[in-house]
Amino acid sequence: MKEYRAFEILGPIMVGPSSSHTAGACKIARVAARICPENYKKVIFYLHGSFAMTYKGHGTDRALLGGILGFKTYDDRIRDAFKIADSKKINYEFVATDLGEDFHPNTVKISFVYEDHEEYVIGSSIGGGNMIIVDINGIQVEFDGTHPTLLFRYNEQKGIISEISSILYKNDYNIESINTIKDDLTEIVNLTIELDQNLSIDLVKKLTTNSKFLMAKYVEV
């Protein structure tokens, strides 16, 4: 289990009132907006658990909008997120829903609607302003957006982690963490690699255009 420092438990510098319901929500949305392409026609926030019951009173709705707009947790513009989103003609909707008992009570599914398809990100606010992304378009992941992150999906095969690690090492990058989740039925592996620094554009291209991967993304917050 991850150990949290004192200031993380107390919560981040933020626009309140709640670290779980505003700061965590803002972080989830900000990461989601980095993962999915920008040219969406509408964004729908499916609020689960306590998010669904208290999102208006706790400011979760405007925090989520603020995150989509790229605001950090301490940005005073979060207070005016609705007005700013409307001025930018962002089409948005909030829907109370039940995502199932497997999800943390403070969870949101953020769906980006495009001309011919949808993409979504599911994240949970886990306390003290901390959050974790758990699903991207049906792909199970586990990362908190603290570090630049590589996300891969591929059919199980030997040498993938070694190959990526070698490329990073040769280019003087350190790996903060590696996490794999394997679907035993399909034998598809979801790999998350957190780094200690931002990747160069050339290295991002090299790592994410490999034909071995069913999906490859780089997320930098």
Image (cartoon, helix red, strand yellow):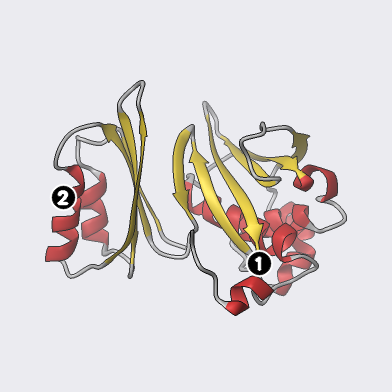
Q: Residue 168, which numbered label?
A: none
**Three-letter amino acid code at the position of disc 1:** Gly
On screen, 100 above or below 26?
above
SS class, disc 1: loop
Looking at the image, is mark 1 or mark 2 earlier in the sequence? Answer: 1
**Three-letter amino acid code at the position of disc 2:** Ser
Mark 2 Cα shell of 10 Å, populated few (<14), some (14-19), many (≥20): few
Give the quarter of the image for residue 26.
bottom right
For residue 11, say whether it is visible.
no
Viewer-side residue, 64 vs 40 = 64
Q: Badge 2 is on which residue?
A: 162
Residue drawn where x is 21% and y is 47% of the image: 161
Q: Residue 128, which numbered label?
A: 1
For residue 78, say whether it is visible.
yes
> In the visual, does 90 lie left or right of 5?
right
Residue drawn where x is 52% and y is 49% of the image: 133
Mark 1 Cα shell of 10 Å, populated few (<14), some (14-19), many (≥20): many
Give the quarter of the image for residue 198.
bottom left
Residue drawn where x is 35% and y is 26% of the image: 184
Residue drawn where x is 47% and y is 65% of the image: 146
> In the visual, does 127 lie left or right of 18?
left
Q: Residue furthest top?
A: 185
Viewer-side residue, 88 vs 174 = 174
